[in-house]
Amino acid sequence: MEITDVRVFPVDEEKLKAYVTIVFDRCFMVSDIKVIAGQSGLFISMPSKRRKNGAFRDVAHPLNSDTRRMIEEKVLAKYEEVLAAGSVARRIRRPREAGAELDGPPSGAAQPLPETPAGSGGRPGHPGI
């Protein structure tokens, strides 16, 4: 498994530094990974969802420490590269209240899927059955 693309969306917040989208093997995307500034330095937080009881649960996460380390190294290297290049025209500001607008593209927004032909079973590039 190889990370074939990393997109960083810097955020202007105290601890939250960026949202990140990664692509594995040019065919599987994981969005809303967060770069967080902790007491010991930067780390990543995998995408999560709030449950009915208020607790958070990861939506996607590595199953072993080697994979987590590989993802974290690639993500943090790309984050540092983006900051060093200064190529980010504007940072994303998270909305503070309902209805507030973002100051840039949606963080970690998924790319739209291509239209699916009739009989494809709803899956791009997949023949219908």
Image (tube, rainbow, N blue to C red):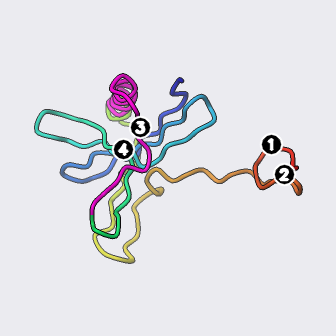
Pointers 2 and 1 in contact (C-beta within 8 Å): yes
Which residue shows up at 30% across the image and 57% down it? 56
What is the CA distance from the residue labelled 3 to the residue labelled 2?
40 Å
Residue for badge 3: 87
Residue for badge 2: 120
Count the numbered circles shown.
4
User: Is tag 4's residue or tag 3's residue first in the polypeptide sequence?
Assistant: 4
What is the CA distance from the residue labelled 4 to the residue labelled 3?
25 Å
Residue for badge 4: 46
Instruction: Tell me where the magenta segment starts and ends, as one range.
Output: 55-80
Secondary structure beneath label 4: loop
User: Is tag 4's residue or tag 1's residue first in the polypeptide sequence?
Assistant: 4
Residue for badge 1: 125
Residue 69, horizontal then vertical, whole percent: 33, 25
Amino acid at dot 1: Gly
Amino acid at dot 4: Met
Residue 17, horizontal then vertical, whole percent: 28, 45
User: Is tag 4's residue or tag 2's residue first in the polypeptide sequence?
Assistant: 4
User: Is tag 2's residue or tag 1's residue first in the polypeptide sequence?
Assistant: 2
Residue 91, horizontal then vertical, whole percent: 35, 51
Which of the 4 image quarters holds residue 95?
Answer: bottom left
Which residue shows up at 32% across the image and 50% down it? 11
